[in-house]
Image (cartoon, grey):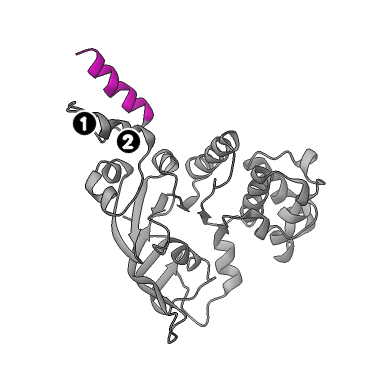
Amino acid sequence: MTQPIVNVENLSHVYMQGTPLEHRALDQVSIQVAEGECLAIIGHTGSGKSTLIQHFNGLIRPQSGTVIINGMDVSSPKIDIRTLRRQVGLVFQNPEDQLFEKLVGDDVAYGPFRMGLPLEEVRRRVQWAMDLVGLSFQEMKDRPTFALSGGQKRKVALAGVLSLQPKVLVLDEPTAGLDPRSRLELLERIRRLNREEKLTVIFVSHNMEEVAKLADRVYVMANGKSVCEGTPRQIFGNQELLRQHHIGTPESVDILYRLREQGYSIDPSAFLPEETAMEILKLLNR
């Protein structure tokens, strides 16, 4: 790997330290993310995923260990947090918590306006960001944010982050609660941002279909620790690992494992739906 844009070394974090409710959320976690990579972070609830990603833009500061983002040390008392948060855009799971203004256009413009950019540049960024997420500037800019659907709110929140033109986009359960159509559309937008705009993407998800479709690499966490990392093919091809850490599989992989349990000779690493279909066709043609 070339010089990583995100470099985490031996990161630990304890909530409610020194109290009866003390909880170690992260324990000596290390992770590197290359520029332009799409990384999925997976693990059961409470494994430390959300705590980890909140370190990336300084919402949580390191208690122990280091977090370096594009050369900036998050633990340094001299770090400019505003600069860091322009570099790392974080979209929360609940988009309504991230919308500040009454109108869509004003909300997307909030970040660039606070940066003190000229109004012409603010407008250019707002139009650019809304176009990237599939929102018509002319149709949506004056629409009230409270009247939006869940999928539209997610897009507005994403556009607001993109208007800052970050180097790294961090998404916490990006499609949670969306209907199937909105989910597919948002996934395609994220894929485009990563593949065409060369934006580094880090996302947390419990949806293994999303992980299989989007991720270049998968990072597995359990009980605040890093368990392993690898390509989606490597991770979903390791049935023992998935069972041990109570991690689900894409539906296509589940079909393959069920066929193997029935005694069929089939490749369990063929995790993409089209690959699974080919494996089943091979069985039918034998």
Q: Nearer the viewer, residue 200 or 147?
A: 147
Can you say whether 57 is above or below 103 in the image?
Answer: below
Q: Nearer the viewer, residue 238 or 9?
A: 238
**Regarding mark 2 in the picture, which secondary structure is present there?**
helix
Q: Residue furthest bottom?
A: 18
51 sits left or right of 250 in the view: right
Residue labelled with disc 1: 260
The amino acid type of the residue labelled 1 equals: Arg
Counting from the top left corner in percent of width and height, residue 170 is at 51, 56
Q: Quadrant of residue 98?
A: bottom right
Can you say whether 268 is above or below 222 in the image?
Answer: above
The amino acid type of the residue labelled 2 equals: Asp
Q: Quadrant of the N terminus?
A: bottom left
Can you say whether 103 is above or below 258 in the image?
Answer: below
Q: CA distance from mark 1 to mark 2?
A: 10 Å
Of marks 1 and 2, which one's residue comes earlier in the chain?
2
**Regarding mark 1 in the picture, which secondary structure is present there?**
helix
Which numbered circle lies on residue 254? 2
Marks 1 & 2, CB-CB < 8 Å contact: no
- Identify the residue shown where x is 64% and y is 43%: 151
Q: From which residue to which does the magenta span run?
A: 273-286
What secondary structure is the magenta-colored segment mainly? helix
Q: Quadrant of residue 9?
A: bottom left
Magenta-drawn stretch contains 157: no
- Identify the residue shown where x is 30% and y is 21%: 278
Q: Quadrant of residue 134?
A: top right
Counting from the top left corner in percent of width and height, residue 267 is at 22, 31
Q: How many marks?
A: 2
Q: Quadrant of the C terminus?
A: top left
Q: Nearer the viewer, residue 101 or 164?
A: 101
